[in-house]
Amino acid sequence: MSWWDKLVAFIPLELVQGLGVTGKYLFRKKVTVQYPEQRLEPKDRFRGMFGFSEERCIVCHNCAKACPIDIIHITDHFEESVVDGKKRKKKVLDRYDIDLKRCMFCGLCEEACPTKPVAIWLTTKTYETAAYERNERLYFDKVRLQTWDGVLPFPGVKAPAEGGMPEDPKAEKKAAGGEGA
Amino acid sequence: MPEPLMTYLVIPLVKIVVILLVLILGAAYLTFFERKILAYIQIRLGPNRVGPKGWLQAIADALKLFVKEDLTPARSEKFVFLLAPVLIIVPALLVFAVIPFGPSDIWRLTDINVALLFVLGVSSVGIYGIILGGWSSNNKYSLMGGLRSAAQLISYEVPMGFAVVTVVVMAGSLSLVRIVEVQRELGVWFFLPGIVALFVYFVCGVAETNRNPFDLPEAESELVGGFHTEYSGMKWAFFFLGEYANMIVISAMATVLFFGGWLPPFPNLLEPLWTSSALAWVPPPFWFLLKVAAFIFLYMWFRGTFPRYRFDQLMRLGWKVLLPVSLANLMVVALGVLMLGERS
Amino acid sequence: MESAHLKAFADAEEMEISFGPQHPSTHGVLRLMVKVDGERILDVKPIIGYLHRGTEKLFERETYNGCIPHTDRMDYTAAVTNNQGLVGAVEKLMGITIPPRAAYLRMILAELQRLASHLVWLATHALDIGAQTPYFYCFEERDKILDLFEEYCGARLTTNCMRVGGMPFELTAGWTDRCRAFIDQFPAKVADWERILTKNRIWRERTVGVGVISAADAIEWGLTGPPLRGSGVRWDIRKVFPYDRYDEVEFDIPIGTNGDTYDRYLVRMEEMRQSVRIIRQCLERLPEGPVMAKVPKVIKPPKGEVYFSVEAPKGELGYYLVSEGGDTPYRLHVRPACFINLQALPEMVRGQLVADLVAVIGTLDIVLGEIDR
């Protein structure tokens, strides 16, 4: 390097350039979202807190089998009833428990549910399920899954018991888009 | 009140209290400003919850440190452990005894004709605080951190001294008041002829205060925790405040030496603007504060941008690059002053 | 006997320091036993296992589609490529060809994930070396990528976005527009960060000549990914054993020359630009059609074994699958890129200073989730 190059190398031009970049960002709009006054809205397919509909459930155990960590506990019994003079056996749901503290929100249960619309779904945009006691409050039984007792629903979202039930989230996922290219 | 008592006791006491209050409050609020400015550079908001827009954050931090448990390590040298933070913050505050904030006598505490020497000497005492802090913690990592920090500080004092001597050569006096006066007489601030000296001074200043890019001794991702690892509560607060007070000292010295201290821009050319127009009510300390604030902003801008030097690279920079450069610059400036005429 | 003790301390040549599992700059729970002489490193011994969760054992009791969420959690900064490796292995064993639309979707998601992973790498690497702000800039961009993932599959980090035989979902309306908008503004951001770092003399002093490994040594140690390419070896699984239609898109592989940290930095920055190029081509050419091949409801690969690897952002991520014909794998072993890259750490830092150790760990881009599984 010539002495001129050495001299110029001493002047930290690239450092000044770096300062320029950070100086530019100093005046940019800040990206902070002031939680809890402001909240980012999760997208439609966001896998959040469970919604469950006992009416739609046909007790097929598909969700329990599909769950990779076996946190869905289902017990049922057969009930005999006489309909139109014929003996009918119907499966009745006794227990539908989800151990929320272990759930990894993978969505495989929702994919496995065969009913249309699904009986178990996660696209509820609700993620605020924090509780002070882990074992009592984060184990959701059939009733709590529908009333969402202890869960803070995302603003605008209703608990399943109050009617916040999607029409057919699975169908929407499979049919949406199509405009790919 | 008798005249001598007023002039020699009461008024200086008032000035001391004012300066100390402003400095300590300023150093505390510098923590807030640093967090805000770093945050804004990093496209986020920084503290904005405590008080209106976060302005009480510094007070909250100070209160928290006040009530924190004051631990002293078991086998440490207790007196020295207590002394070390004091040795860091007191010299930083003491320097402001000789810095002029304005033209006349009311704007400074005192004016001694070797003020620059006083500043250099007193600020060097801070290094003892670091060494003693590291040693008295009875922790070999603190000791190593303290020694590294001290080595860094004394290495960078030498080029800083030469940069300052450059200004002395240009001004012809060691008195800070006289240096500012000369800048007013000449009509040009010393940063123009002394641009290299300013650069060297500020870089050394950043290294002297252990700030990014020279903050390896106290970086978190390092093995040695730095000399203040064992300190907690108010003692640690003093270390921290001492660091910010030192930042203010370096910035104040840089403005006085290179940027005309309390002078408004173009003091001679625009004199009518500053003396008779509507802007005449602007007090001189305003300009001083403005320039100090600009330097402090530069400190924080550096922290937000640059990676940090490794220790050996840091030492190499101080001894092998800055020292020859500041020496060469001194010779060039001295030659220039000789050729352009004598200064008294 | 005080003086003897002090003399022993002063004369001691070696000191063994434990860079403990919880440390701000080991990326994850990695423990390093560092033997130093003063400031020079004599030897480094990584101790891992603090994040071991028995993933490979868990694989043996899950159905194949149930294994996919477990793979998300291995290299948690790059979940999509983990998924891609697993489904690719099963498809290879079963002989399934996925529809072209699914292949292109996989490529787009994988390259977006490469961008996201490299953004985490840059953020943490710069932070370790002292530059605090690229962290925030990188995470702003990463957030936009994670938004795209969230819109597609419902999760940002643990995506679970691939299934054996194709993709589970179709794209949402406007996803491609948003993706295109993102990659249009991304190269300008990369240029910004390069302006802060690439020519910066402090950055160069911290990274040039640090953690050098020669090409021959890199091959011997089994390094893959940017550490290998930084040493000058032209090896990228996407070019050498193309999967998922990578042979239909044009892209270059950046190669370094010296094998030091600076070269690996340049390689990854260029990889980010090449990923943008790939995504742009895929978006243009995205074919219509189904996203899922005809796959039986219960996936039962025939008896056999297969090895399939993908070019994950960290390196070559391989899956070795042994199937006995049932619906769960008999053995599913993961070849973790980071684990094998980490083995070269002692080789790379011997003789350097302690401050460089942090830089080299950052440049190897290790994620303990993958190392420990």
Image (spheres, coloured by chain):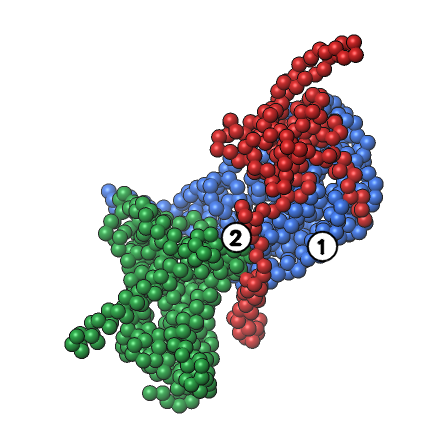
Chain colours: A red, B green, C blue
* Mark identifier at residue C127: 2
The answer to whether residue C267 is seen in the rendering is no
Quarter where residue B51 is shown: bottom left
**In this view, which residue lies farthest toward the bottom?**
B341
Quarter where residue B154 is shown: bottom left
Q: Vertical placement of B184 versus A171: above or below? A: below
* Mark identifier at residue B97: none
What residue is shown at x 46% (from left), y 65% (from top)? B297
* Mark identifier at residue C181: 1
x and y percentages locating residue B301 in the rendered image: 49, 63
User: Which chain letter goes with mark 1?
Assistant: C
In the image, taking residue B149 as reference, residue C125 lies left or right, namely: right
x and y percentages locating residue B270 in the rendered image: 46, 85
The answer to whether residue C184 is seen in the rendering is yes
What residue is shown at x 77% (from left), y 50% (from top)? C283
For the residue pair B30 and B272, the one nearer the viewer reads as: B272
Task: Give neighbour class at mark 2: few <14, some 14-19, many 20+ (Cα, 10 Å).
Answer: many
Tell me the amino acid under the disc marked 1.
Ala
x and y percentages locating residue C268 in the rendered image: 64, 52
Which of the two discs, 2 and 1, sits closer to the camera? 1
Q: Vertical placement of C297 versus B16: above or below? A: above
For the residue pair B228 and B239, the one nearer the viewer reads as: B239
What residue is shown at x 36% (from left), y 87% (from top)? B343
Tell me the amino acid under the disc marked 2.
Leu
Q: Secondary structure at mark 2?
A: helix
Specify which label sits upstream in the sequence, 2 or 1.
2
x and y percentages locating residue C149 in the rendered image: 68, 44
Q: Vertical placement of A126 versus B118: above or below? A: above
**Which quadrant is home to the C terminus of chain B?**
bottom left
For the residue pair B207 and A72, the one nearer the viewer reads as: A72
User: Which chain letter goes with mark 2?
Assistant: C
Q: Secondary structure at mark 1?
A: helix
